[in-house]
Image: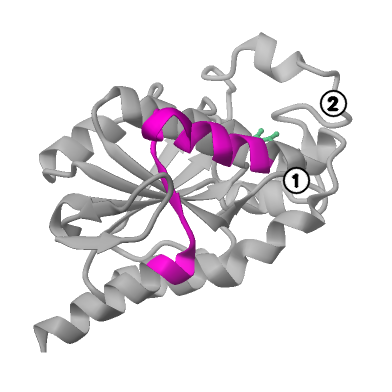
Amino acid sequence: MIELPANPFPYAFDPAHTALVIIDMQRDFIEPGGFGESLGNDVALLAAIVPACRAVLEAWRKIGGLVVHTRESHKPDLSDCPPAKRNRGNPSLRIGDAGPMGRVLVAGEPGNEIIPELGPRPGEFVIDKPGKGAFYATPLHDLLKQDGITHLLFMGVTTEVCVQTSMREANDRGYDCLLLEDCTESYFPQFKASAVEMMRAQGAIVGWTATSTQLLAALAAATAAQR
Ligand code: TIU
């Protein structure tokens, strides 16, 4: 077991039963011209977490941990996109419309890809999800159960939308979840701060939070102890 300082109390996990879940680090949310910007957001804030996410991903790969990437992604015929989702907020570009990075939030389009810095490698799970949560209408829970996964480490965007929804879904399915605070971001800094606080409140009602530095130190200490 590896234990690290976390909020509201230390978090312990066995890497063999833990997955790193990276939520929606897609060009559609992080680069100009995609879905995030079409909703009226300034996308510049989100790119700042990429180096910290990359450091965690590399360390996690080094210890042989399971990696899950998700993409908010719809089928080209939009049969998995409820009209309520497509029309919500009267965005400048709706899901499925052609934008500067291809059709917005549609599988296979350039904007729908995970940013190259965090691109998936063979053997890692890539989950296309039509909702905000990673478990709704996806095979994720079955895949994690087959691999004996009980603990999830979360990174990605945006904190209070897809990350929080996914972490709540995971918590209800019995996983012990840790959110890496500096590896998640929102278009609204106050929403990130509130989401982080509300998830760890009430004795980790949704899960724990820690920094990437705390996780990386714990992984390094565990690796050194094995030598
Ligand atoms: N709009 C917003 O903050 N987020 C999303 O629509 N999707 C994700 O969080 N991935």
Q: Nearer the viewer, residue 138 or 103?
A: 138
- The part of the chain drawn in magenta is 192-214
Quadrant containing the C terminus is bottom left
In percent of width and height, residue 84 lies at 68, 10
Horizontal arrangement in the rendering, residue 48 relative to residue 155 (left or right): right
Callouts 2 and 1 close, C-beta under 8 Å = no
Q: Is 87 in the magenta? A: no
Res 109 seen here: yes
Which mark is on residue 91? 2
Of the numbered discs 2 and 1, the one sitting upstream in the chain is: 2
Ligand 1 position by quadrant: top right
In percent of width and height, residue 2 lies at 20, 63
Q: Residue at x 52, y 19 (%)?
A: 80
Name the outermost residue toward the bottom.
227
- Label 1, secondary structure: give it: helix
Q: Is 205 in the magenta? A: yes
Q: Residue at x 41, y 61 (%)?
A: 120
Answer few, some or many: residues within 10 Å of disc 2's Cα (few below 14, many 20 plus, some between 14 and 19).
some
Q: Could you tell me the amino acid type at mark 2? A: Pro
Res 105 seen here: no
Prevailing SS of the magenta stretch: helix
Horizontal arrangement in the rendering, residue 78 relative to residue 93 (left or right): left
Q: Is residue 43 above or below residue 47?
A: above
Q: Residue at x 77, y 56 (%)?
A: 45
Q: Could you tell me the amino acid type at mark 1? A: Pro
Q: Which residue is mark 1?
A: 189
In percent of width and height, residue 113 lies at 57, 53
